[in-house]
Image: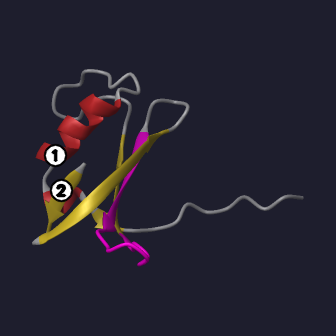
Amino acid sequence: MRKIIKYTRYEIVSEFYDNGDSSSVAKTIVEEGETAVNTYRLCVGSRNPLTQMPFNKDAVALAEYLKSSDENLWNAYWEDPVEEAE
């Protein structure tokens, strides 16, 4: 899926966590051989914020929400902290 955020088109890659929440990353669209840059990120709970219907890990339902989401909801990209092994 692609989405325009702040006048630039990005490729959106999403994943669901075990609890049903999701994380979506807006990556730059690049030519073959180039490296995409993670630019924005949006985390969404297990329910659609607009309808309160559960996503049930349905990638299509999540994509529909993301397509209509306000660009101001997207935050600058951040990495999840890595847990250190003891």
Q: Secondary structure at mark 2?
A: strand
Q: Secondary structure at mark 1?
A: helix
Q: Quadrant where the C terminus lies?
A: bottom right
Residue at image point 28% right, 35% down: 62
Q: Does 67 sit above or below residue 72?
A: above
The quadrant in which residue 2 appears is bottom left
Q: Are marks 2 and 1 in contact (CB under 8 Å)?
A: yes
Cα–Cα span, label 2 and label 1 = 6 Å
* Residue 26 in the image, given as x and y percentages of width and height: 31, 61
Residue 30: in magenta span: yes
Q: Does 27 sit above or below residue 3?
A: below
* Residue 74 in the image, given as x and y percentages of width and height: 26, 60
Q: Amino acid at mark 2?
A: Lys
On residue 9, which mark appears?
none
The quadrant in which residue 56 appears is top left
Q: Is residue 15 left or right of residue 81?
A: left
On residue 67, which mark appears?
1
Residue at image point 35% right, 26% down: 58
Residue at image point 13% right, 53% down: 70
- Tell me the colour scheme of the image: secondary structure
The part of the chain drawn in magenta is 22-38
Front one among 19 and 6 = 6
| Residue linked to disc 2 | 3
Q: Residue furthest bottom?
A: 34
Q: Amino acid at mark 1?
A: Lys
Q: Does 81 sit above or below residue 64?
A: below
Q: How many marks?
A: 2
Residue at image point 39% right, 46% down: 14
